[in-house]
Amino acid sequence: MTRSVQMRSLGGFSLLALSLSGAGGMLAVLAARVVPDLAPLLLVGMVAVVPVIAFGLARFHTLVFLAIASSSLVRREPAPIDLMVPLLLVLGILTGRLSLKGVERSSLIHACLGLFIAINLISLLVAHDLTYASRYLAITLYLIGLAYFVMFYVTSAERMRLVLSGYLTAALISVAMVGGELLGLIPTREFFVRESRAVAFFKDANVFAPFLVLPIVFLVDELLRPHLFPGRFWLKIGAILSLSAGVFLAFSRAAWANLAVSLVVYLMLSAPALSLRQWARLLLPALTGVTVLAGLIIQLNLVSFLLWRARPLQTYDTDRFGIQAEGIEAGLSHLFGIGPGMLSNAHSLYVRTFAEYGIFGLITLLVVILVPLYYCLRCACSDTDRVYGLSARVVSASMIGLLLNSVVIDTIHWRSFWIMASLCWIAAMVHVSRKRNQG
């Protein structure tokens, strides 16, 4: 690249940075007038936006890694990932670093997402708390944007490796903080472990534990069939055991079922192609895991607590089922639901969607999830199950576990839910494209 071309590129990037910062500044001033308490935070954000944009332009992929690696830092909102992803989405589109070819494929998914958003807007009109409903809808729209960002970004094995590296980093740091607090290695109390349940940097143990399932299944696949991360056998085993301990220590019954179902589905999809040697490689982490689990239970005096958590029904389950019954009734009596965010503590993705957006909202969301999952499963069962290096078996199994988890937990505002959905879209689109090319 000649000096004149470099200067023109630098000038264009500088103009883009100033334009974005100027627009951000005007929005910050308007927001500060509406919400005066946010003025100091907005001022800091306005000052920081120029160097962040400059860093994003110079080190776009590094900023993507940092965004995904911060996806577990969600105790306070907006979380770091929420600030970086919109910026990356804008920068990536303007500079051509994000591929928009995904929009040209899977028109059914895009149409249903558009219809789902339209139904959200219609249901907003009947919400009894318009302010809260608008905020809830804005979060939903952002998370759909997060899914599109991942889909636009992952177009090669290198980029898939970077995204999964960021996700693994987030998961392992979270588990390390939980372990450090339990073992007294870090000077915190009741921060990473609350009421004897691991939460890490999350607000709820029921959100923290499912976040770890995808990396566990992915590492099991990499242990059996190394591809994106070759070698490092013992490191993979250590990571699998650490992440599994994190799921256990969260004491989330739904997450336990999520992990168990995900692993069983993965092994069922992989069984026809696994050799005896590969099956044998699973024995070591399995036996070590049982030993470590028993040691944790004894060392931390968790027997009585574990027995209590393992009960099929807890005292609060009665209230949970009552709210779900109200949600079903609301969905049956309101064609377009009762409005975004109007059914609190639903503890079910499906009941909440039905109640807040009606039958059409539930159908469109299910199409967005289940149609890609169908093609992802077909890819998982084909001879070429890898999509940009990631096995469709991992994606399918993790998605099925997450959908089971969603029966008793509301997952629509989980960042990990939309990242998982995006990986499923990618696998489905690549598989369909392959079949068309072969035909």
Image: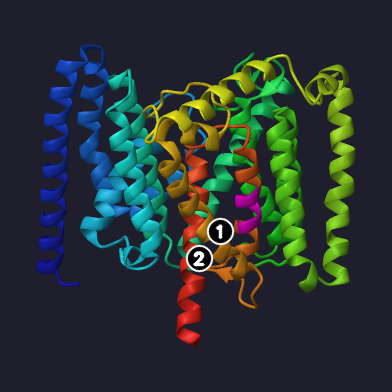
Left/right placement of residue 237 relative to residue 167 reads: right
Residue 395 colored magenta?
Answer: no
Left or right of 365: which side holds 102? left
Q: Residue at 89% of width from left, 32% of height from top?
A: 294
Q: CA distance from mark 2 to mark 1?
A: 7 Å
In the picture shown, does residue 263 fall above or below 438?
Answer: above
Residue 46 coordinates in the image, percent (x, y) = 20, 30
> Nearer the N terminus, badge 2 or badge 1?
1
In this view, the residue in front, 100 or 119, is 119
Residue bearing the label numbered 2: 428
Give the quarter of the figure containing the N terminus. bottom left
- Please, is residue 277 above or below residue 247 in the view? below
Mark 2: few/some/many CA within 10 Å (<14, 14-19, 20+): many
Magenta span: predominant SS is helix
Three-letter residue code for mark 1: Leu
Please name the residue that numbered disc 1 is placed on: 373
- Amino acid at circle 2: Ala
Badge 1 density bin: few <14, some 14–19, many ≥20, Cα 10 Å = many
Residue in the image at 33% along x and 25% along y: 133
Quarter of the image where one finds residue 243 = top right
The answer to whether any part of residue 246 appears in the image is: no
Q: Are marks 2 and 1 in contact (CB under 8 Å)?
A: yes
Return the x and y of residue 316 as percentages of the image width and height.
67, 15
Look at the picture and state if 381 lies above or below 399: below
- SS assignment at label 2: helix
Residue 11 drawn above or below residue 80: below
Q: Secondary structure at mark 1?
A: helix
Closer to the camera in the image, 365 or 254:
365
Please tell me whether residue 397 belongs to the stretch shown in magenta. Answer: yes
Q: Residue reaching furthest bottom?
A: 439
Q: Position of residue 197 (x, y in %)?
A: 69, 22
Q: Tell me where the magenta segment starts and ends, as one range.
A: 396-400
